[in-house]
Image (cartoon, helix red, strand yellow):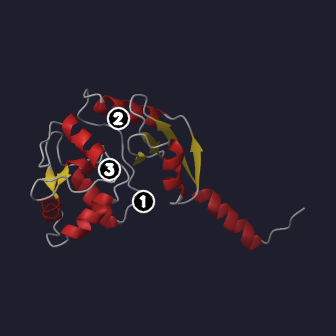
Amino acid sequence: MEIYSYQQLISNERILKMRTVLYGGITHNHSVPVIVSEKGLVYIGSFNESLQEAKLFVDSKGLFTFQEKSPLLTRALEELDEYLDGIRNEFSTAIDFQWGTPFQQLVWSELLKVPFGNSSNYSEIAIAIGRPKAVRAVGTAIGNNPISIIVPCHRILTKSGHLGGYSGGLSMKETLLKTESISYKA
C-alpha cells in the first residue's frame, strides 16, 4: 500500500478538478476532426487529419478526459458537414476559446465578424481590433486559430488579395474559399 502525504493528496485533488471532459469525432463526409468541451468548440482540424493527431494537439494543452458522444459534438459535426457540402453558411455551435491569450481571443472574435462569402485582410483585422500597427501579431494569432473553418481564418487574405498562409495547407484554404465563392489572386 502506498502512503501519500497530505500535500500530494491535495495536489492530486486539484489536478482532478482541473481535468476537463472533451468530446471528439470526425465529420462523416469530409474526415475533419472536431473536439468540443462542455462549453463549445475547442478544435477543428484539417482535411484528412486523424482524431489521434487532433488529440495530440489537445493533450499539449493540459489534462483532459476524452469521450465520444455529446449533443454539442453531434451538432458541430453536422453543421461542419453541411457547410462543407455547400448547404450551410452560418454556424450555431458555441465556441470555447479557452486556449487563447486575451489578444488571440480578440483577433479570433473579430474573424467571426467576417461574413460568409466575404474576405478581409490582416491589416483590416488589426484596425478593427484597435491595433493598426499589430499586423504581424494579428497574422500570428490567426495562424494559431485552433477552430478553423467556423472561426473563418480562411477568409483572411493578404492586402494584395493573395492567399497568404493557412495552417491546414493552401489547398484546404482554396477549397474553403471556393465553397464560399470568394475570389483571390493566385
Which callout, 3 or 1, points at the residue further toward the start of the chain?
Answer: 1
How much space separates mark 3 and mark 2, taking CA atoms? 18 Å
Decide: few, some or many residues near mark 1? Use Cα within 10 Å; few <14, some 14-19, many ≥20. some
Give the labeled residue for mark 1. Answer: 99
Give the labeled residue for mark 2. Answer: 80
- 12, above or below 112, in the image: below
Provide residue 112's location: percent of width, then percent of height.
24, 49
In the image, taking residue 48 as reference, residue 181 lies left or right, namely: left
Helix, strand or loop status at disc 3:
loop
The quarter of the picture where residue 81 lies is: top left
Q: Nearer the viewer, mark 1 or mark 2?
A: 2
Residue at 49% over, 55% down: 57
Indicate the amino acid at tag 1.
Trp
Helix, strand or loop status at disc 2:
helix
Residue at 56% over, 37% down: 68
Provide residue 134's location: percent of width, then percent of height.
20, 71
Indicate the amino acid at tag 2.
Leu
Q: Nearer the viewer, mark 3 or mark 1?
A: 3
Decide: few, some or many residues near mark 3? Use Cα within 10 Å; few <14, some 14-19, many ≥20. few
The quarter of the picture where residue 149 lies is: top left
How much space separates mark 3 and mark 1, taking CA atoms? 22 Å
- 160, above or below 74, in the image: below
The residue furthest left is 160
Residue at 18% over, 63% down: 129
Indicate the amino acid at tag 3.
Gly
Provide residue 113's location: percent of width, then percent of height.
19, 49
How much space separates mark 1 and mark 2, taking CA atoms? 21 Å
Front residue of this view, candidates 133 and 143: 143
Give the labeled residue for mark 3. Answer: 169
In the image, taking residue 19 as reference, residue 92 lies left or right, namely: left
Helix, strand or loop status at disc 1:
loop
